[in-house]
Image: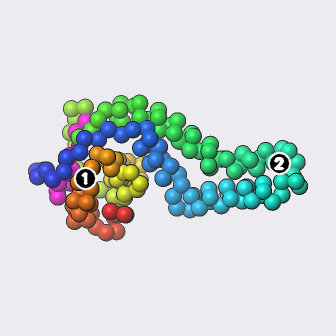
């Protein structure tokens, strides 16, 4: 693929960015609604029925209230921190994007990808996600994009159909 370079990004993913990505995916859609309703129900029962419950039942409700607000984020952070130390994330990546597609270089290896091969593109707080499939994606932190963000989003709007992009 002939690449006419339009944008070039040096990408170094941090544990915090991986954690944000994991939190986003574990709390979006119906699962996020369930997590919220479950937590609110546990809190409501704790506040309104505290005196009616035995100590073990109170402890169970406290655990339920903390499950999606404290425990899950903590576990996801531990997982992200472990991932960030892995070879594929720890090594910096160079990404060159053009109207044809993009090239990724990491550890002396090079991969060329056409925009037609991209499943979807989504911007969330702090990063852009280029999904290749449901389980494979490239993260581009906003800090790597820098002041080129608006021009880069214009390119994405040109090459990715509207139904395959979100908040771009």
User: Under tag 2, what secondary structure?
Assistant: helix
Foreground: 30 or 147?
147
Q: Looking at the picture, how far across and down is residue 79, in whole percent?
A: 50, 37
Q: Horizontal placement of 2 versus 71: left or right?
A: left
Q: How crowded is mark 2: few (under 14 residues within 10 Å), some or many (20 or more)?
A: few
Q: Which of marks 2 and 1 is nearer the N terminus?
A: 2
Residue located at (56% from left, 44% from top): 73
Q: In which quarter of the image is the C terminus?
A: bottom left
Is residue 138 something that shows in the picture? no
- Answer above or below: position of 63 versus 45: above
Q: Name the residue under label 1.
A: 147
- Disc 1 on helix, strand or loop? helix
- Residue range of the region highlighted in magenta in the rendering: 95-106
Q: Nearer the viewer, residue 50 or 20?
A: 50
Residue 56 lies in the magenta-colored region: no
User: What's the residue at 78%, 56% (across, down)?
Assistant: 47
Residue at the image position 57 percent from the left and 58 percent from the top: 31
Q: How many labels does the image show?
A: 2
Which residue in the structure is indicated by mark 2?
Answer: 57
The answer to whether residue 81 is left or right of residue 136 is: right
Q: Nearer the viewer, mark 2 or mark 1?
A: 1
Distance of mark 2 from mark 1, alpha carbons?
53 Å
Image position, residue 44 (x, y; %): 74, 59
Q: Residue 157 carries which label?
A: none
């Amino acid at each position: 693929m002939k690449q006419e370079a339009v944008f070039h990004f040096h990408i170094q993913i941090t544990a915090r960015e991986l954690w944000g990505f994991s939190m986003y995916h574990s709390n979006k859609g119906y699962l996020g609604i369930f997590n919220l309703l479950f937590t609110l129900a546990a809190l409501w029962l704790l506040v309104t029925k505290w005196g009616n419950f035995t100590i073990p039942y109170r402890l169970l409700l406290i655990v339920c209230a903390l499950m999606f607000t404290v425990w899950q984020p903590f576990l996801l952070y531990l997982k992200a921190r472990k991932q960030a130390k892995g070879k594929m994330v720890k090594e910096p990546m160079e990404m060159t994007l053009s109207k044809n597609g993009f090239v990724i270089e990491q550890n002396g290896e090079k991969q060329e990808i056409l925009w037609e091969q991209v499943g979807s593109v989504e911007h969330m707080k702090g990063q852009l996600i280029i999904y290749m499939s449901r389980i494979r994606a490239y993260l581009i932190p906003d800090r790597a994009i820098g002041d080129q963000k608006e021009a880069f989003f214009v390119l994405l709007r040109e090459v990715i159909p509207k139904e395959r992009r979100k908040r771009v």
